[in-house]
Image (cartoon, rainbow, N blue to C red):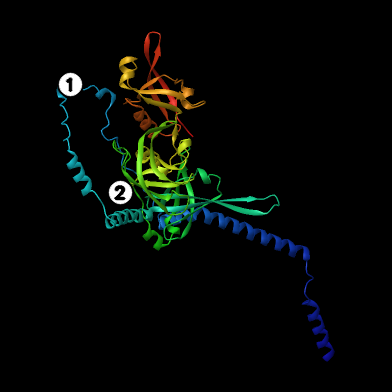
Amino acid sequence: MEEKHNQETDFMKETIKQRPLNRKKLIRRTLITAAMAVIFGTVACLTFLVLEPVISNRLYPEEEPSTVVFVEETEENEILPEDMIADDSQMLPEPSPPVLEDEQIAQVLSEMKLGIEDYSSLYNSLSEVAKEVQKSIVTVVGVTSDVDWFNNAYENEGVISGVIVADNGKELLILANVNAIQDADALKITFNDNLEYEAALKKKDSNTGLAVLSVLKTTMEKSTLDAVKPVDLGTSAVSNFAGTPIIALGRPLGTVNSVCYGFVTSAGSIINLPDSRYKWITTDIYGSTGATGILVNLKGQVVGIIDTYNNSSDTKNLIGAFGITELKKVIERLSNDKDIPYMGIHGADVTMEAHEDLEVPYGAYIMEIDMDSPAMAAGIQSGDVIIGVGDTLINTYQELINCIITSEPEQTITVDLLRQGPEGYTEMELDVVLSRK
């Protein structure tokens, strides 16, 4: 009986013996499982990347930046050419100024004498204006990475001054002349609370070198947002600008937050650039040949953007600036992330003398055409007088500039012009396809 039980036990042990492991099948199943996991993970990641912005925008819709608009300025006492012919019957003689005796002149001069306390009060007032505007001044650092002869990596930093011109709700927008840092790999901006943030180049105007940089407000500390503000843009379209007090802020001396006081010495010169012309403001402020920053009036309003490139050779160290009025449309486009349209013309107004003596019709007189420009491709020539763009009549060169700057790159505009020939002026109509420069 016991022998029989042992045989049954041995039989059971033999029947439940583990099968030998098939290594090939195990490896194949492992590889298939790993591949399926990779495929599943990849599909899940791609699905998340595609759907996450959509879901986020549905749940937390991102606020669109508001459009930046600046008040358009017009020249004070501006007179159109056709309005220059005066009616003698309406002209009255101007009253003669009263003649002062020597004693009266001496009395007036004596009353104008200022003491030390008066000077101190005067400059304290100027300093208060400067301090308020400095809330809008920033330092822009352009970082450029390079390798020296010994294959050692290093960084160069170019420093310029900028000014906060707008807040579109999403970003702070900074205007700066970036010619000195145009090759920078990265941009950093330090605000007046000494905190530094990464910035991005929004758009640049190749004519002036001015660009608008942006800093995302979500990356900024609340303390910084509370400490800064956009600057007020004033006007440079005044007829009696020369002789008025001015404050230069930013880096007029080439150092951070330098401040200079002076006077406007002239504002009658014009800088002619393609499709634009700017009032050129000169001052008696002695500064750096690499000065950057702004000119402000005694109200703390920006009236000029400092630029040293257009200084004459004998006044290299005197601060000069582009007038702010003519720049407003350009700054507006750059702030709204729009390219500057390019036509490629240089022009001037037709004067009353040219109209009367040479019989040149009123309009925008074309002095020069850029090579390979849209204007040249359309057939516009030097000496042409543009009298209309689409449905808009053109009486001055500035009106033509306004039509160009409010158009869009790749847009086709119809130009009506007069071209002089043997029989006089002939009217022509040309289509110009604007580009971007």
Q: Is residue 310 visible?
A: no
Residue type pointed to by label 1: Asp
Q: Position of residue 182 (x, y in %)?
A: 53, 44
Name the residue at 34% across, 29% down: 399
Q: Position of residue 49 (x, y in %)?
A: 53, 55
Residue wearing tag 2 = 298
Q: Position of residue 392 (x, y in %)?
A: 32, 27
344 or 10, which is in the foreground? 344
Name the residue at 42% across, 21% down: 430
Task: Report helix, strand or loop for mark 2.
Answer: loop
Quadrant of the snapshot with the N terminus: bottom right
Q: Is residue 227 above or below residue 9?
A: above
Residue wearing tag 1 = 88
Q: Residue furthest right?
A: 3
336 or 260, which is in the foreground? 260
Quadrant in which residue 426 is drawn: top left
Relative to 68, is 178 on the left or the right? right
Residue type pointed to by label 2: Leu
**Label 1 environment density (alpha carbons within 10 Å; few <14, some 14–19, many ≥20):** few
Cα separation, mark 2 vs mark 1, equals: 39 Å
155 or 371, which is in the foreground? 155
Q: Is residue 430 above or below residue 290?
A: above
Task: Report helix, strand or loop for mark 1.
Answer: helix
User: Looking at the rendered structure, which numbered label has been put on residue 77?
Assistant: none
Q: Earlier in the sequence, mark 2 or mark 1?
A: 1
Relative to 37, is 277 on the left or the right? left
**Label 2 environment density (alpha carbons within 10 Å; few <14, some 14–19, many ≥20):** some
Q: Position of residue 20 (x, y in %)?
A: 79, 70
Q: Is residue 5 above or below residue 325?
A: below
